[in-house]
Image (tube, coloured by chain):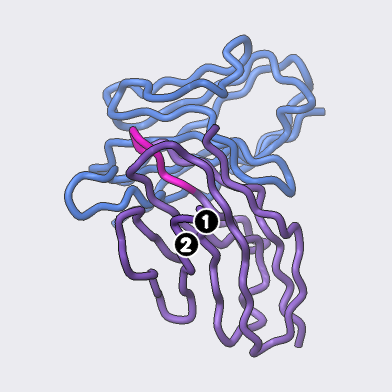
Chain colours: A blue, B purple
Amino acid sequence: EAGVAQSPRYKIIEKRQSVAFWCNPISGHATLYWYQQILGQGPKLLIQFQNNGVVDDSQLPKDRFSAERLKGVDSTLKIQPAKLEDSAVYLCASSHGTSGIYTGELFFGEGSRLTVL
Amino acid sequence: AQKITQTQPGMFVQEKEAVTLDCTYDTSDQSYGLFWYKQPSSGEMIFLIYQGSYDEQNATEGRYSLNFQKARKSANLVISASQLGDSAMYFCAMRLLDDKIIFGKGTRLHILP
């Protein structure tokens, strides 16, 4: 079974530029998450999708961040314009959810490392 | 407030010793789940162990066990017979209603030879 795919792995941009990250979850996983992990800190939930609907985006800085999950499969996270403090690893994760035997365990991609200069 | 607290920023442990990583949580949800993940320097997130709020037995997975004390709202990870490869960041996480999952700040574990 293929894992969670993310791209690009690395991105360097100047402040005020825009960037987009892509995530393809594990096939059949209805729930998709985007986390921001600043160096030395724990992952911070930015947005959670259930199929193509948003479940939680309370910590997404909506003035500059946007995310979509068209057709309930892959997802894109965009930052425009980027700030220095957006430098972080952006982790995408997917899950079966908690129906039936599933615990809601997250399966993570390798992450996209963003550096804003 | 829904929160995960890991109070140990870093720990140093001698190889082959047991180690306990602390995690306390706060939620008003009756049904929730607790996870531990390991993040080596390579950056990947590795699932270690899960405990459901209604599970009566403490979870175990090989050398990992979860010391779940519901009344104290704690879910400490115990690693028995530590190995050099256990050196990594360890995150405690909580699954809430609607499957929202939040993480603690982590504990960096160093295993000394």
Q: Is residue B97 magenta?
A: yes
Residue B83 image-quadrant placement? bottom right
Classify mark 2: helix, strand or loop. Answer: strand
Mark 1, residues whose alpha carbon is within 10 Å: few (<14), some, or many (≥20)? few
Residue drawn at x 50%, y 61% is B46
Q: Nearer the viewer, residue A2 or A103?
A: A103
- Residue closest to the far top: A63
In this rendering, the count of numbered labels is: 2
Q: Looking at the picture, how far across and down is residue B35, in whole percent?
A: 45, 56
Residue at 43 percent across and 24 percent down: it is: A56
Instruction: Identify the residue under disc 2.
Output: B69
Q: Considering the numbered disc 1 on the image, is that residue within a helix, a strand or a loop?
A: loop
| Image position, residue A101 (x, y; %) | 20, 55
Q: Are marks 2 and 1 on the same chain?
A: yes
Do the numbered discs 2 and 1 sit on residues whose CB atoms are within 8 Å? Answer: yes
Identity, as a three-letter code, of the amino acid under mark 2: Gln
**B53 relative to A37, above or below:** below
Q: Is residue B34 magenta?
A: no
Pick the quarter of the image with the C terminus of chain A. Answer: top right
In the image, the segment drawn in magenta is B94-99
Q: Which residue in the protein does label 1 denote?
A: B72
The subunit carrying tag 2 is B
Q: Residue at x 49, y 34 (%)?
A: A34
Cα separation between marks 2 and 1: 5 Å
